[in-house]
Amino acid sequence: MKTAQQYKDSLRERNVRVYIKGELQDPKTLIDHPFVKGHVASAAMTYALANSKDYEGLCTATSHLTGHKINRFTHIHQSVDDLLIKIKMLRMISQKTGTCYQRCVGFDALNATYSVTYEIDQKYGTDYHGRFKKFLTYVQDNDLMLAGAMTDVKGDRSLRPGQQKDPDLFVHVVEKRDDGVVIRGCKAHMTGMVNSHEMLIMPTMGMKPGEEEYAICCALPTDAPGVTHIFGRQTNDDRKCGGDIDQGNAQFGIVGGECLTVLDNVFVPWERVFMCGEIELSGMLVDRFACYHRSNYGACKGGVSDVVIGAAALMADYSGYGKASHIKDKLNEMIHMNETIYACSLACSCQGTCTAAGSYYVDPLLANVCKHNVTKIIYDIDRLAQDIAGGIIATMPSEEDLRNPEIGGYVEKYLRGVESIPTEDRMRVARLVENMTGGTALAESMHGAGSPQAQKVMYAKLSGLEEKKKFAARIAGIRGSEE
Ligand code: SF4
Ligand code: FE
């Protein structure tokens, strides 16, 4: 397994092409860029904790392929217990980072691809699963971080991939050669991509006859020739170029450091291609990946909300109203909601089942309910955090004002709450609430792992509405409905 330092060093060795605010970055120093370094520190926690005595139980596993001790983020779930340990691990890491550590996307993509390649081979007699196991062994033995690359940019949402005026709006195979394929297109919202070693490309949705070129699953290094990453902006990100107080979470940043990844005629050798035209199973790969990732959200956002709840409570203490009954009531409401989403993550994992490949898969209906709850509950938790923290989170002067020799004294004197608490501490917590409950963080809870409508679509497939109608018809005594 890599240490956190080895992970960071290995990122500098990539010849990755990344643009930030219109400027091409030097690959050697990319991870020191103020916009990137917090996300790297957060991802590095997945390495550091696996190497620590206290957390190796949660953060490591035994490879079912090699028997080696591996980082859990490269593991294929071998039991319901593995699914549950993952959930506990995610909540724990979120409590330490207060933000996304990005590595679950690749983890989920590995698990989805593992089981689906097996089923493609069963149906078509192909050898994708064997290829994938070789790739997986390489990932496990080198403790690599993968970006899971599913979401295409999709252009006009009313049109299928082949109907778009520009065929590149969905990633597709533009050439099949003896030695591999050439792909073109663009993946959006790529969490952790610029600080990953590899990306695992998957189709963005189930493909139909005639859309075979879009049913592509393959792996490539993040610095493969033809790949360009364009880093996304976040709310308040220019604050990262100043002091640390105004950032809120200066150490780990907010959310995952997403980017747009352009694939401009990228060559992928056959040994790294895991689906190529098998449209009938493309939807299964999308569903498996989506459900694994949706199952995480009650745990990862649960841990993040543990920090938000703590920050709101600290703000109340620092301001002198921590003992007020309405504050305690609001904190209890937040705790209730937070444990509710965590319970959903545990539930869909408890109900996990074995796939044909022998790996374990979460209960898909409950995984969607889990993520869907997050799209609402996080807004309610964050609303209460802002309610408790007060208007100061929206109007507070800057760290520069606090440090200014002429007016710093005013800030120090007039922003003090409880006498025993330094003004700077109160400012730090106020900024933490502001940033953790602000624009980019909230939007991620809504759209990460798929927008709410994507979860509702799954209810139609999974909830058994016709059976519910039969239950009702029988109880209502409708003729012909008897069992
Ligand atoms: Fe992991 Fe949560 Fe980040 Fe997704 S949003 S990669 S589940 S920490
Ligand atoms: Fe996410």
Image (tube, rainbow, N blue to C red):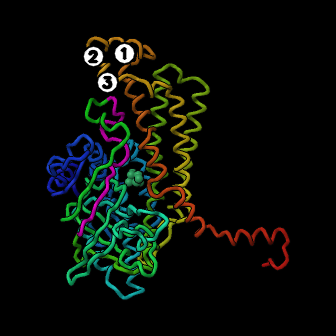
Instruction: Please give the count of numbered marks on the rendered protein.
Output: 3
Disc 2/disc 1 C-alpha distance (Å): 9 Å
Mark 3 surroundings: few (<14), some (14-19) or many (≥20) residues within 10 A: some
The amino acid at mark 1 is Val
Asked if residue 459 lies left or right of residue 211, the reply is: right
Q: Residue at x 34, y 74 (%)?
A: 216
Q: Which residues are magenta?
A: 245-265
Q: Secondary structure at mark 1?
A: helix
The amino acid at mark 2 is Asn
- Residue furthest to the front: 165
The residue pinned by badge 2 equals 404
Using the rendered view, name the quadrant where residue 265 is placed: bottom left
The image shows residue 398 at horizontal and vertical percentages of 34, 24
The residue pinned by badge 1 equals 411
The residue pinned by badge 3 equals 399
Label 2–label 1 contact, CB within 8 A = yes
Asked if residue 223 lies left or right of residue 106, the reply is: left
Q: Earlier in the sequence, mark 3 or mark 2?
A: 3
Q: Residue at x 50, y 32 (%)?
A: 386
Disc 1 within 8 angstroms of ligand 1 (CB):
no
In the drawing, what numbered circle is on residue 430? none
| 250 within the magenta span | yes
Nearer to me, 334 or 265: 265
- Quarter of the image with the N terminus in it: bottom left
Nearer to me, 189 or 262: 262
